[in-house]
Amino acid sequence: MGATATALRHDDRAREQFEQALALENRFAFTAARRLYEELATNVEAGPVPSEARARLAAVDHLVAEKAVYERIDENAKRLLCEVGMNVGESEPIMDILLGADAIDFDNGTAVFIPLRRDYVDACLERVPREMPADPGPDAFGTGATPPFLKRPGSDDLCSADRREFEEICRVVGENADVVKIFSLPVATDRSISGYEVARCMDRSFDGLKMTVTKGMTDDEAAVLNGRDDWLDGTSLITSLGPMGSMVDAFLRSARVGNNLLLLDLSIAGWSGAGTPEALLTQIHAQVLFMMVLAQTVNPGVFCMHGGIPGVAEMSGDLSYSSPQQPLINAAMARVNRWVTGLPSAQSGGSTSRLELTPEAVAESTRSRNTLRRYGVHVLRHAMGILGSLNFFSLEKFVSDCAQERQTLRAIETAPTRAGIVPLYFPSDPDAMAGLREIAERGCNPKSADHTVRNVNAFADWERRVAAKDGAAA
């Protein structure tokens, strides 16, 4: 009896240590978790814990390597700002702000564009809040993000939504608030309803987190979002390493007013962005960080959500939301923030490139959502109601997607809990920084850069590796 009691105590201690390792893993402290798993696998001889520890040890080895790449992406994004710079020299408003803040590194003689001082970048990023007051929680899926056209059942008439149609969209979104956790501006509207009225309609229908665009609003109207924890002001500034002239004034106004900012970058791999997963995320991350630095310069402490939303393209260059690579690269961008920076982040997925509401379109969207859920994201836009790679919003598809999401969530509630984090096997690119400097120095479209041409199969190779690893695990 004494031997049995001793064995039980050993089993209990081993189980407790395993749970400690699992908790560390779920906090992304993979190296510390690995030490505990290795100790259990080596020193515990009986019971189920050693085999469980060995299984997690194999996964954590991949997670340690994966996190190291994300840490390099974060560091290299800051190096990009400070060693290569952003092409903002011809933007007088931006240059005036940076000069006034003594943010420019005038001692850098090798930068291609306008380099920032590293200590200034670090100080600004330190000011960005890591807590989100109205945080809907992890894997919060929603709709919207302004497709230009409304897809009407049985009609090929593609145009913006009118007031009546938009009010109906808002009503239906409110009815599905059990699965919709962020209500982004769902579709472009015609002149029958203003941007300010659009926001008021969304506000009346939905109590949770909402996002709109204030660019077309008056100063007084844009300021209405100030102090509202449940609203995000979606804005952008930098693309292809330089500012969009049409966005400068709107961006600066939103930051100065103090609205909660969703800072958007929708660069597409090999077209407006670099051609490998690591180089693309480094570029996008740097561009979003520059927006954060500028926002913190004009309004220290203003809330900034990281909206780096990487895209993949078809051979034609068109954005492809049917590609399995789309949720993979968005999950990786989310992990950069969840594992390394701690910044609240928004990703994109759960959609399709198909133009019509068909069972295949709904199934494709479901697979995309489930992929993002498998690897973990924060806020997910475009998840329900979108067709044609973000060109169309369909209320009919939105209802179908919500019904499918409800069914998925019920299945998750009854499924066995999966222990630990699933590796994404993110591919390393030691030439990422060299590729980004090449794009900057040559002033070329990323698709013609030597780095892109040499790595034309990078995304497809990654997709195949993930599929092979998942198949072996199954």
Image: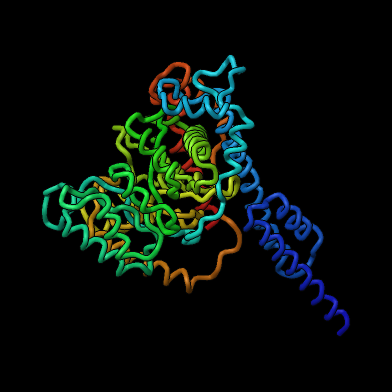
Q: As displayed, is residue 330 above or below residue 19?
A: above
Residue at 47% across / 28% down in the picture? 455
Q: Residue at the right extreme?
A: 2
Residue 323 image position (x, y, % from top left): 36, 44
Q: As displayed, is residue 142 above or below residue 119?
A: below
361 or 439, which lies in front? Answer: 439
Q: As displayed, is residue 212 above or below residue 291?
A: below
For residue 312, what is the image quadrant?
top left
Residue at 59% across / 22% down in the picture? 105
Q: How many marks?
A: 0
Q: Residue at the front extreme?
A: 220
244 or 352, which lies in front? Answer: 244
Residue at 48% across / 32% down in the picture? 283
Residue 172 image position (x, y, % from top left): 26, 66
In which quadrant will I find the N terminus?
Answer: bottom right
Residue at 40% across / 43% down in the picture? 254
Residue 318 image position (x, y, % from top left): 30, 36
Q: Is residue 294 left or right of residue 207?
A: right
The answer, for residue 366, to whether it is visible in the render is: no
Residue 297 image position (x, y, % from top left): 52, 36
Q: Residue at the top extreme?
A: 109
Q: As displayed, is residue 253 above or below residue 4?
A: above
The answer, for residue 134, to whether it is visible in the render is: yes
93 or 326, which lies in front? Answer: 93
Colouring: rainbow
